[in-house]
């Protein structure tokens, strides 16, 4: 008996070229308005929005379809307060001791520092974990492949889904992030990957006046 899953017909809608171009242009215009936000409102987000965005993240391709990710949605105010405290401890050490000057110089125009109030202010913080292996019901391990690549794609899907739904986002990677395993009760085979902060922007929120490079600056067609 084969252990292969059954194959089903592909659900695919072939679009007219004009419709393809229109959809691509509309999506680009929407995503081009996405900005990393550091000033959030504490206003709660509507029920179901984050959950559907996570369902979208779960549709991302992954090595051998093993989906080597786990998302922890942190809504509890006290847990977010502890998260901020622990993250800022690491960030102070990073900015004052561990970060090379070149990296600090790159960050300087963005105005970032060791203070991370958004971790406590925003109504939702999603901790993303990368799993080096999975566990079967009988306790056996299943090795995961292309873990970082797979999780990175899933996070991209998540950010696009949250933005499309009308929420502001920020990605944050306190260095190191090992404290997240204990705080959020995650097993040792899950490696903290990054934090996604989500919510409405604070009234009057500002962002750096940055531009994105033109297509030909980062694309080669052969």
Image (tube, rainbow, N blue to C red):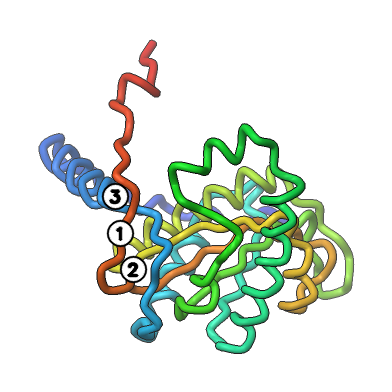
The answer to which image quadrant residue 165 occupies is bottom left
Task: Judge from the rendering whether residue 185 lies leftward or rightward of residue 141; answer left or right.
Answer: left
Q: Position of residue 84 (x, y in %)?
A: 62, 73
In the foreground, 75 or 131: 75
Q: CA distance from mark 3 to mark 2?
A: 12 Å
Task: Judge from the rendering whether residue 32 lies leftward or rightward of residue 38; answer left or right.
Answer: left
Residue appearing at x 70%, y 43% in the figure: 99
In the foreground, 33 or 64: 33
Q: Are marks 3 and 1 in contact (CB under 8 Å)?
A: no
Q: Which residue is mark 3?
A: 31
Q: Which residue is mark 1?
A: 206
Q: Position of residue 80 (x, y in %)?
A: 59, 80
- The number of callouts visible is 3
For the C terminus, the image quarter is: top left
Crowd class of label 2 (few under 14; some 14 to 19; many from 20; radius 10 Å): some
Element under label 3? helix
């Amino acid at each position: 008996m084969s252990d292969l899953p059954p194959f089903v017909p592909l659900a695919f809608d072939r679009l007219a070229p004009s419709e393809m171009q229109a959809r691509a242009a509309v999506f680009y215009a929407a995503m081009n308005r996405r900005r990393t936000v550091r000033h959030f409102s504490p206003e709660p987000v509507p029920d179901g929005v984050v959950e559907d965005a996570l369902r979208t993240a779960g549709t991302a391709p992954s090595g051998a379809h093993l989906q080597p990710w786990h998302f922890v949605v942190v809504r509890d105010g006290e847990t977010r307060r502890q998260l901020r405290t622990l993250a800022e401890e690491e960030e102070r050490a990073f900015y004052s001791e561990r970060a090379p000057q070149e990296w600090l110089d790159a960050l300087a125009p963005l105005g970032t520092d060791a203070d991370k109030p958004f971790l406590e202010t925003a109504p939702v913080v999603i901790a993303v974990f990368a799993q080096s292996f999975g566990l079967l019901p009988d306790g056996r391990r299943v090795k995961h492949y292309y873990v970082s690549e797979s999780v990175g794609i899933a996070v991209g899907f998540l950010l696009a889904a949250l933005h499309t739904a009308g929420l502001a986002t920020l990605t944050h990677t306190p260095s190191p992030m090992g404290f997240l395993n204990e705080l959020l009760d995650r097993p040792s085979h899950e490696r903290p990957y990054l934090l996604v902060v989500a919510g409405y922007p604070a009234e009057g929120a500002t962002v750096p006046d940055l531009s994105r490079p033109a297509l030909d600056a980062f694309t080669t067609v052969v």
